[in-house]
Image (cartoon, rainbow, N blue to C red):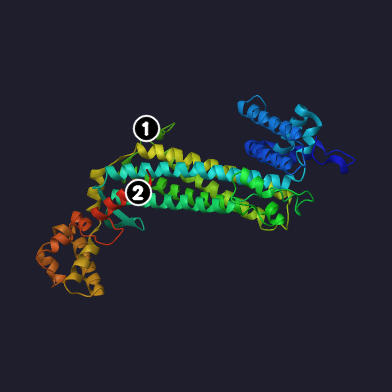
């Protein structure tokens, strides 16, 4: 039975029913749908639209349906959507009074409510998962507060940095992800229920009461906006896409660093796989899957934006397609966070290889230029002189640390005997002074800050 058949002489064709049914997708909203219905029933009773007995019957039956679905004793099937399934199940249990449940509302505002309730729960679960990964990164940073590796730009050796500093960069990214989700929730946490199909209703509903009971901060002010707006979904999936890009970047580094060419880390066996042909292979499949799954969530965002871009006000059936990208973005991000957090906790870093690599590629050339500036040269002149010294060292097949004082003086007459300390890799780390730098003092400050934030 549909919720709308009175105007039609002929029933919907079976093929059209199967094509248009969304139950397989939106049945996961049963908790949100029932919570919204219970609040709606309570409000109808308070407004004198339903009697106390009707409120009791409807609210009791709704809670019983929720428990039966949760326990697996009731499987939603055969209906147009989760809303019609629940109402039909109520009719089967308590009779005609079930038909009064829908007084003063439409599926349009009902769907919009369910989605906002879903987003609210999803933000809470994702925020917890983001913090879990932050803690894992922080624990690794604490273990490696003195491990040096080359920092990269353009995937070329750039300057020596501490591994802890590198890992803490991701802690910062994830903090912004949490902040974005919190900001999304601030706008999403308004109730659309009571907007009806588009124009509101002639029943004197107390929309604020429903919003308060469901924990919303207020109501969506315009009834047309309430039923047609999907900004909350777009913003949520956008935030998820940004977070997945962050995870993809970290996963990419684990893929690179675990290769023989880098040798910077080893991923535990529990998070790698082998080859069906090559016995020696140990593949970083979980990291690669996270990197690959980021494209799905980016696609989810594009799907939502494309879905909305041409829709006139107010509700259109196209909006039925808004839930698959919402659910997929949530599920993909949450599972990726879980796997990456567990995988990263069991990564072993090749500290000696990192340290040796930091001594390759003339990574202290910038320190040499800054040293010459302190001796009185203009930065551009110092930059040129340092570049000439690097070229000479490359041609001589020597690292900067093996050049003699006289060799430095050939290109930089202002250099003094302490120039060798300027090109020493550990000294490069120690000499950093700017806030947020890779100096040990700054890294320990960052670790202390995040330890207090993530307790």
Front residue of 30/43: it is 43
Residue 259, percent from left and from top: 34, 43
Which numbered disc, 2 or 1, marks the residue that appears first in the sequence?
Answer: 1
Using the rendered image of the protein, determine whether residue 175 is visible from the camera's viewpoint. Answer: yes
Residue 186, percent from left and from top: 55, 53
Residue 132 vs residue 106: left or right? left
Residue 412 vs residue 15: left or right? left
Q: Please rate how many residues cluster around mark 2, counting C-alpha atoms within 10 Å: few if below 14, some from 14 to 19, many from 20.
A: some
SS label for mark 2: helix
Q: Which residue lies furthest to the top in this view?
A: 73
Q: Name above or below for residue 168 compared with residue 97.
A: below
Q: Please rate how many residues cluster around mark 1, counting C-alpha atoms within 10 Å: few if below 14, some from 14 to 19, many from 20.
A: some
Q: Do the residues labelled 2 and 1 touch (CB within 8 Å)?
A: no
Residue 156 vs residue 273: left or right? left
* Residue shown at 74% from the left, 35% from the top: 52
Residue 290, percent from left and from top: 47, 43
Residue 449, percent from left and from top: 33, 50
Front residue of 276/184: it is 184
Q: In which quarter of the image is residue 348?
A: top left
SS label for mark 1: helix
Q: Name above or below for residue 335 compared with residue 203.
A: above
Rendered-image quadrant of the C terminus: top left
Residue that badge 2 annotates: 450
Residue that badge 1 annotates: 269
Q: Distance between the residues labelled 2 and 1?
A: 30 Å
């Amino acid at each position: 039975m549909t919720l709308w058949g009175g105007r039609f002489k002929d029933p919907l064709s079976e093929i059209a029913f199967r094509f248009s049914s969304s139950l397989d997708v939106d049945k996961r909203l049963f908790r949100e749908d029932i919570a919204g219905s219970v609040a709606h029933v309570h409000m109808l009773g308070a407004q004198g639209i339903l009697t106390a007995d009707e409120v009791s019957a409807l609210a009791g039956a709704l809670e019983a349906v929720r428990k039966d679905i949760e326990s697996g004793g009731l499987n939603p099937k055969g209906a147009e959507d989760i809303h019609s399934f629940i109402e039909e199940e109520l009719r089967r249990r308590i009779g005609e009074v079930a038909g009064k449940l829908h007084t003063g509302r439409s599926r349009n505002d009902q769907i919009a409510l369910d989605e906002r309730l879903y987003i609210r729960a999803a933000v809470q679960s994702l925020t917890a998962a983001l913090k879990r990964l932050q803690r894992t990164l922080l624990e690794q940073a604490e273990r490696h507060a003195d491990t040096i590796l080359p920092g990269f730009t353009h995937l070329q050796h750039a300057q020596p940095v501490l591994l802890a500093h590198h890992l803490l960069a991701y802690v910062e990214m994830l903090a912004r992800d949490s902040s974005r989700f919190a900001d999304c929730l601030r706008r999403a946490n308004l109730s659309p229920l009571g907007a009806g199909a588009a124009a509101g209703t002639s029943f004197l509903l107390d929309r604020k009461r429903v919003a308060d009971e469901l924990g919303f901060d207020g109501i969506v002010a315009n009834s047309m906006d309430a039923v047609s707006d999907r900004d909350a979904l777009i913003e949520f999936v956008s935030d998820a896409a940004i977070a997945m890009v962050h995870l993809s970047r970290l996963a990419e580094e684990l893929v690179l660093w675990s290769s023989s060419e880098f040798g910077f880390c080893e991923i535990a066996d529990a998070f790698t796989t082998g080859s069906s042909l090559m016995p020696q292979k140990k593949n970083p499949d979980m990291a690669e899957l996270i990197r690959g799954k980021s494209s799905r969530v980016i696609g989810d965002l594009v799907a939502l934006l494309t879905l909305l871009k041409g829709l006139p006000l107010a509700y259109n059936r196209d909006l039925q397609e808004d839930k698959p990208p919402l659910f997929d973005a949530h599920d993909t991000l949450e599972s990726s966070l879980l796997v990456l957090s567990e995988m990263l906790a069991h990564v072993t870093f090749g500290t000696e290889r990192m340290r040796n690599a930091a001594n390759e590629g003339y990574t202290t050339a910038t320190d040499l230029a800054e040293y010459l500036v302190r001796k009185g040269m203009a930065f551009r002149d110092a930059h040129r002189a340092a570049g000439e010294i690097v070229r000479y060292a490359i041609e001589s097949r020597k690292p900067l640390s093996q050049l003699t004082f006289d060799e430095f003086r050939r290109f930089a007459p202002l250099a003094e005997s302490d120039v060798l300390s300027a090109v020493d890799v550990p000294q490069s780390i120690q000499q950093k002074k700017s806030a947020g730098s890779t100096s040990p003092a700054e890294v320990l400050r960052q670790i202390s800050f995040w330890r207090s934030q993530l307790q």
